[in-house]
Amino acid sequence: MVNRMPTSAEGTVAGSPTALVRAAAQALHEQFFEPLAVANLYRDAWEGATAALARAGVAPLPPAPAYPADPVAAHALHEATFPALERLAARRLGPVEITVAALDELLRRRRDGHTFLFTPRMLQRARSMSGPPSRTFGLILSNTSPLTVADVLPRGPAQRAGLRRGQTVLTINGEPAAHLRRLEALALMDQQEGAANTLTVRAAGGETAAVELPSDPLPPISTAILPGPFGLLRIDGFTMSVEETDGLRAALASFQQAGALGWIIDMRWNGGGVSIQLSRLLVDRGRLFSRQRHAEARLPDGTVLVMREDIEADGTALPFQRPLVVLIGPGSTSGAESFAGPLQAFGRATLVGERTAGWCGAARRVELAPDWVILLAAWQTVFGPEERRANRVGVTPDVVVTPSPQDEAAGRDPQLEAALDILRSETAR
């Protein structure tokens, strides 16, 4: 369900910067999982726009208006004052640039990984791609500035190309990138087979290098039998399709048939989606997690955002179970976190690796106007008997293992090695 910003009776263009900022502020005020003051939202947008104007050399710049606490009055003051910034931008910035600056600051200040602007350019690129991603760079980027390499897949394309943790990404395919968030940066990269992306990176020592980065095929589910024998399942994103559920069930059944004594599920590269179907294969009874928001919301289109939704195991767990280790890291987001966190709380799995991204919630897509879309976190996810909150925090592993530069250079995977050691110890008892 999306909310559209209509054209007003006075003839305001639906896609004008003023109208788009109002639509975003209204959507956040109504739908965000925690209460937000409209006055603060408009102040954030104003400061984002004036910062862009200052970078473009526009001066002097007016201070943010004293927005009132009353939402109706705040909306009215915004519509009366923000057009002045549009007029100041006319000679230096286009409507798209001033809108992106205002909305990006507005959304960044929510400090939420699910709350994000899709610019017209990003939407155009998304439409050109059919279906979910089928290739991977083996690269996790930070979600804060400066854009940094947060993790690389052992022996994956990024590591083979020479990318290492901690490097700052300065440009992607010739475009400045250090100020971007993770999804904005990935939108600049070409995942087509045979395409080589050029990244300019700076290491901690200050030296810069240009790196050619190709992509590898991305199987939806990959499995292996490792010495032990132990089954390794890697899934890099969830679609919640019947085919996926059948594939997950078949993967674990294949481990059973191979005589695997324990299982490892690799969530380090999992960008999210709905993981309930995998959790229900591993936990037979109990509450997996809950989605919560500060209050019920009834939107003008009739949509009701419930205050709480409890997600339960449904008694369909596999009849055979084995000791389980789940690998997590900074690339584990959203559904990967609401999978790993509850299994840790249940005592069903040992988590190994590094803290997850902290994107523990559920997002809604809101169309502000044609070609202008935002995501926002309408619920946060809590799990365990204490209803643990991991949004903006992340899930902490039971066993922390951080790859060293020597590990990266050699293509070693110390997190997987630690998981194998744990399973050897558990199955030897």
Image (tube, grey):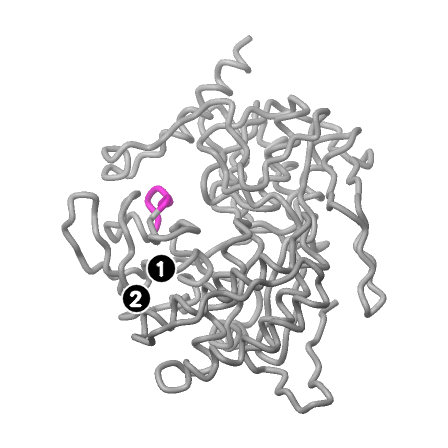
Q: Quadrant of the N terminus?
A: bottom right
From this viewpoint, which residue is outermost toward the top?
Answer: 429
Q: Quadrant of residue 79?
A: bottom right
Q: Mark on residue 100?
A: none
Residue 140 at x, y = what percent? 40, 49
Does 115 appear in magenta? no
Q: Nearer the viewer, residue 229 or 309?
A: 309
Q: Secondary structure at mark 2?
A: strand
Q: Quadrant of residue 200?
A: bottom left
Q: Residue at x 41, y 30 (%)?
A: 415
Q: Residue at x 45, y 66 (%)?
A: 63
* Pointer 1 residue: 179
Q: Nearer the viewer, residue 3 or 110?
A: 110
Residue 145 at x, y = what percent? 37, 53
Residue 414 at x, y = what percent? 36, 29
Q: Quadrant of the C terminus?
A: top right
* Pointer 2 residue: 176
Q: Residue at x 63, y 39 (%)?
A: 338
Span of residues in magenta: 150-156
